[in-house]
Image: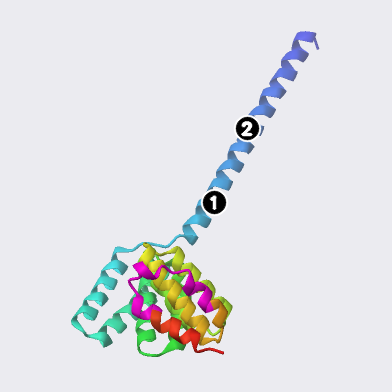
Amino acid sequence: MSSMDKTKKVFTQLISFSINNLLVQIFLFLLVAFLIWSAWDMLRPKTSSVADTALSNAIIYFERGDFDNAVLQLESVVDDHKGTSSANQAKFYLGRTAFINGNHDKAIVLLSECAAKLDHSILKKEAYIMLGQLDSDLDIALNFFDKAKNSALSENEITYISILKAKRLAMEGEKAEALEILDQIDTENNTYEELFEEVYGLSLTLN
């Protein structure tokens, strides 16, 4: 075989190897991209116009004062549209209803399942406030109040949450910690003055 033929053969092999290597890289890139997209698609809240409509209907029942039908509608949204943002929001309303009705065990289950998944900061904040009032573990409850602060939209809301956090501490007998929080609140610009005075008075009565 002449030198020219050998050179051509080597060159041909190099081209073939480069093409095959490039195809492998493209395949691996597409595979990784597909896996990342699949994982994201599984984890993101699913949207559904049907679920949104069902949730809206449930809210209408609430506005009319028909709470029994509202609860039934919300439970249907949760059961029929799992994984959607509407289902998470329906759990919030069910949890809040249970909280108001004194069914705290049910409330804490529902709110724990949906709080972190809620799209709206207002609902997320309220969910964490209720969890902070309900959880029997003080450390976990305080953490919920801190999460509620992270979803607050104003200084007034942060003040309100701080007072509730201090109240929870006072109810657990943690006088020093409660007063430390209360003493940091601006009493001259306090929208929640009555609640503040109530919790401060409660804290001072502790031994």
Residue 135 lies, with reference to residue 46, above or below; the image says below
Pointer 1 or 2: first along the chain: 2
- Residue 139 visible to an observer of this rendering: yes
Q: Which residues are magenta?
A: 178-196
Mark in the foreground, 1 or 2:
1
Q: Which sits in the foreground, 26 or 76?
A: 76
| Residue that lies at the very extreme toward the front in this rendered image | 188
Say if the magenta span includes residue 193. yes
Q: Which sits in the foreground, 142 or 68?
A: 142
Q: Which sits in the foreground, 190 or 115?
A: 190
Q: Amino acid at mark 2?
A: Leu
Q: How is the image coloured?
A: rainbow
Residue indicated by mark 1: 36
Residue placed at 71% from the left, 23% from the top? 14
Q: Is residue 59 left or right of residue 128?
A: left
- Residue 109 visible to an observer of this rendering: no
Tell me where residue 112 appears, x and y as whole percent.
48, 76
> For the N terminus, which image quadrant?
top right
Task: Return the mark for residue 44.
Answer: none
Residue 36 lies, with reference to residue 133, above or below; the image says above
Residue indicated by mark 2: 22
Residue placed at 41% from the left, 74% from the top? 127
Tell me where residue 73 appears, x and y as whole percent.
29, 80
Say if the magenta span includes residue 30. no
Give SS at disc 1: helix
Q: CA distance from mark 1 to mark 2?
A: 21 Å
Q: Amino acid at mark 1?
A: Ile
Tell me where residue 48 appears, x and y as whole percent.
33, 63
